[in-house]
């Protein structure tokens, strides 16, 4: 492969020194270096601002000014290309001043030969490259720390919101069941329900971004999932946008939560729709990439396995370079306040990273945008969907439940719902009180229903202590703030069951019946 040519700018007011420098570069190797020349500080300043050169050779004396002044100015403005100071005298003070001003090297005129000049240029370029890599790593570390902090905040906010939404959703359902469809107030209550559902979707995005969302991965065919989502997308993006799909001819099995991958596709489609207000084309494609393919991003190559590529491309307005630096940051949005939360792309990023994948974005202003998502292919076969069984009439179950919830508004709602189902309900606002209630109750307790995040004692600690007292006790953990590790700890290992907030009364009732009748998760 041919070596890439290096563009050099000489800032020097003496034409003879320009000719000497040009001849030395030609002696190194014709065509390897391209030399431009300016003869004043002002011309040099304009060229530095333009940033079109790889290396700058700056004379110490330029008219009435010094190259040190130009070096300091360029350094203060963030010019990261290497700058080499040239001087006619060997003075230690000038050498030290040059290094302090940001020079990569210091050469003495009259002592410069072709090998020395080439060595200085190569050294300076290598040093600049290492400095850029170091700054990039520092920026990535700071970004990761910022994302972690925002993630903790988002998870805590989502927890509190989900408690409130559980109460709003539950009491709304109770109102609707009593009002009936013919009541004039039913429409207003339905609007409250829809608003709660939209708020619940927002908290799900917060939890996904903060990696506190329970995910239920399974092996699924990416092609089939895109095909299912396609039927919804056309209604979502509108008739003025043409939707095209270009799917791989072979199945693409991936291990992921189907609802999260659907959310990724929907979020990207909504962004594309908003980027094409006058219409355009949205193209969704899939492709199998073999391990080692040049198309796989570097962060995904270490897994050394085949990848599925999911591409979402539009012909919209594109993304400018400044905006591109922030698109995956939470709450960053260029949309009007009523049209975007700034969580769409941060959610996409979080989901792709959770499944061990990577993202590449290519965009040009006025020419559209393309998101390429890389997801590892699963080794297992795709899980066939289970056939739906007709819902049977609700059986009446005589059981005693111990309800533990520190939020009184949620506890009162759940007690009312469970008593309406015919259960005997014991309740406690925290773990210590729950243990006291369990010890004082002489009869059986069939199921512990407990929040996970509570003061003094967590739901897991409470469950361990009560199961030690009552080995046959079943446990249902309920939380608006939990991650997949918790889910697999309490559900996947058979130590309990899990229900994510917010939930409707019907979902709560069905979950408890399933546990009491056959122990299903």
Image (tube, rainbow, N blue to C red):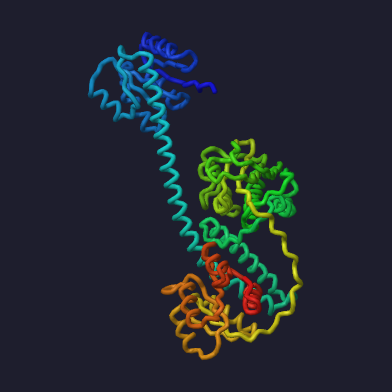
Kindly identify the residue that appears in the image at 54 percent across and 90 percent down.
443
- Rendered view: 434 above or below 341: below
Kindly identify the residue that appears in the image at 45 percent across and 16 percent down.
35
The number of discs equals: 0
Q: Can you say which quadrant of the picture contains the C terminus?
A: bottom right
Q: Residue furthest bottom?
A: 442
Kindly identify the residue that appears in the image at 42 percent across and 47 percent down.
142
Depth check, front residue: 200 or 184: 200
Quarter of the rendering containing residue 494:
bottom right
Confirm whether residue 339 shows in the render: yes
482 relative to 310 in the view: left or right? left
Q: Can you say which quadrant of the picture contains the N terminus?
A: top right
Depth check, front residue: 215 or 333: 215
Depth check, front residue: 312 or 240: 312
Confirm whether residue 241 shows in the render: no
Residue 280 placement (x, y as % from top left)? 71, 41
Residue 366 placement (x, y as % from top left)? 63, 36
Residue 209 placement (x, y as % from top left)? 53, 55
Depth check, front residue: 231 or 33: 33
Quarter of the rendering containing residue 183:
bottom right
Residue 440 placement (x, y as % from top left)? 47, 89
- Rendered view: 41 above or below 362: above
């Amino acid at each position: 492969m041919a070596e890439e040519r290096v563009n050099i700018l000489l800032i020097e007011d003496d034409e003879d020194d320009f000719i000497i420098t040009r001849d030395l570069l030609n002696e190194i190797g014709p065509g390897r270096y391209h030399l431009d020349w300016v003869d004043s500080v002002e011309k040099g300043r304009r060229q530095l601002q333009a940033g079109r050169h790889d290396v700058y050779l700056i004379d110490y004396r330029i008219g009435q000014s010094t190259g040190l002044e130009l070096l300091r100015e360029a350094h203060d403005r963030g010019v990261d290309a290497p700058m080499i100071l040239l001087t006619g005298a060997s003075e230690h003070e000038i050498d030290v001043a040059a290094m302090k001003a940001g020079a990569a090297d210091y050469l003495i005129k009259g002592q410069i030969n072709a090998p020395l000049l080439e060595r200085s240029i190569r050294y300076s370029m290598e040093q600049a490259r290492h400095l850029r890599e170091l700054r990039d790593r520092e920026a990535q570390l700071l970004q990761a720390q910022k994302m972690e902090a925002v993630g903790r905040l988002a998870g805590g906010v989502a927890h509190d919101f989900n408690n409130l939404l559980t109460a709003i959703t539950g009491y709304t359902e109770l109102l609707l069941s009593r009002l009936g469809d013919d009541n004039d107030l039913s429409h207003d209550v339905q609007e409250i329900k829809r608003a709660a559902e939209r708020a619940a979707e927002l908290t799900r995005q917060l939890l996904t971004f903060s990696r506190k969302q329970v995910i239920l991965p399974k092996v699924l065919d990416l092609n089939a999932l895109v095909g299912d989502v396609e039927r919804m997308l056309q209604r979502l993006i509108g008739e003025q946008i043409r939707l095209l799909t270009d799917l791989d001819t072979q199945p693409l099995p991936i291990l992921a939560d189907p609802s999260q991958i659907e959310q990724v596709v929907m979020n990207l489609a909504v962004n594309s729709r908003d980027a094409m207000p006058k219409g355009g084309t949205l193209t969704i494609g899939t492709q199998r990439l073999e391990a080692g393919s040049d198309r796989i991003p570097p962060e995904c190559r270490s897994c050394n396995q085949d990848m599925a590529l999911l591409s979402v491309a539009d012909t919209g307005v594109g993304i400018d370079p400044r905006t591109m630096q922030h698109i995956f940051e939470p709450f960053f949005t260029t949309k009007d306040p009523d049209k975007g939360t700034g969580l769409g792309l941060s959610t996409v990023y979080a989901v792709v990273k959770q499944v061990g994948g990577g993202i590449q974005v290519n965009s040009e202003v006025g020419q559209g945008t393309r998101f390429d998502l890389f997801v590892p292919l699963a080794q297992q076969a795709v899980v066939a969907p289970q056939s739906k069984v007709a819902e049977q009439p609700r059986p009446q179950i005589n059981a005693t439940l111990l309800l533990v919830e520190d939020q009184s508004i949620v506890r009162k709602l759940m007690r009312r719902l469970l008593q309406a189902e015919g259960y005997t309900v014991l309740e406690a606002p925290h773990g210590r009180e729950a243990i006291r209630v369990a010890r004082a109750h002489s009869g059986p307790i069939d199921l512990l229903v407990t929040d996970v995040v509570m003061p003094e004692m967590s739901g897991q600690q409470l469950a361990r202590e009560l199961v030690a007292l009552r080995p046959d006790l079943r446990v249902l953990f309920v939380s608006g703030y939990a991650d997949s590790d918790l889910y697999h700890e309490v559900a996947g290992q058979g130590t309990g069951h899990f229900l994510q907030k917010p939930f409707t009364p019907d979902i709560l009732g069905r979950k408890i019946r399933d546990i009491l009748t056959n122990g299903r998760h």
